Image (cartoon, rainbow, N blue to C red):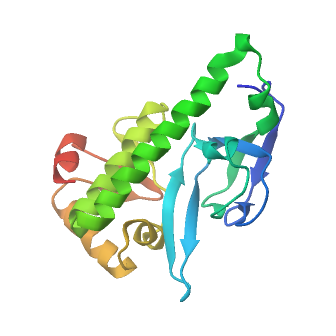
Amino acid sequence: MLIADGEGLQQFKRHQHLARAGEAQDTIYRVEAGWACRYRMLRDNRRQITALFLPGDYCEPHWLFSAEVHHPVVALTDLRVRRIPLQEIRDVPVAQYENVRSVLRAILRSLHGQSDWIVSLGRKTALERLSSLLCEIFDRLRSGDQVLDNQCAMPLTQHDLADIVGLTPVHVNRVLQVLRARGLIELSARWMRLPDPEALRKLG
């Protein structure tokens, strides 16, 4: 990290914005705890979530290249982030270049993830969309040591899930019931367990 432990930490409450469209941004954030998302609002107030930010993720790392906020970012849960001034990344000495490489890798992961989401929204069935999303969340949390006994946090509401996969909350509820009935997911009290992650991944 470019900022020493104990410095640069910032708290956001659920539904509080980290950034709003049109703002200039001189900082990127690394999520320490909690979840956030990027979204777009349509003219009829329908929301489309276009990116999730989980613990360990850099929030909007491409701000390194363009400091203007194009789409708002909001906390989905209470959130703790570490602020990384963009100037510190741009001026980093050669000895600390690995810090820059980690941000650039985050940008690449973000681009790959957006491509996967476009395919999912454009071509996959409701069952495939939701299965793919749940597997993605599970895999990302597992890579950050946030999974134990195939169980991880799941603070997203059915409305949040609907805004990600382009379905109605009612349709999302039906698909979740199908996945439960097949024994592929267990949901309770903001937690998710995948008894057989590979089976769910194949479905997605």
Q: State whether residue 156 appears in this view.
A: no
State the quadrant of the N terminus.
top right
- Residue 185 percent location from the top left of the image: 27, 54
Q: Residue at x 20, y 41 (%)?
A: 198
Residue at the extreme right of the image, as rendered: 7
Q: Residue at x 40, y 44 (%)?
A: 112
Please tell me whether residue 86 is drawn above or below residue 193 in the rendered image. Answer: above
Please tell me which residue is depicted at 65% across the width and 62% down the height of the picture.
70
| Left or right position of 163 against 31 | left
Q: Is residue 194 visible?
A: yes
Res 91 quadrant in image: top right
Residue 121's spot in the image, x, y percent? Answer: 32, 65
Q: Nearer the viewer, residue 30 or 185?
A: 30
Name the residue: 46% across, 59% down. 189
Could you say which quadrant of the image residue 31 lies in? top right
Q: Is residue 36 left or right of residue 2?
A: left
Residue 32 position (above or below residue 79) = above
Q: Position of residue 59 (x, y in %)?
A: 62, 46
Q: Is residue 109 left or right of residue 23?
A: left
Furthest toward the bottom, the residue is 44
Residue 167 location in percent, x, y?
35, 75
Count of numbered marks: 0
The residue positioned farthest toward the top in the image shown: 95
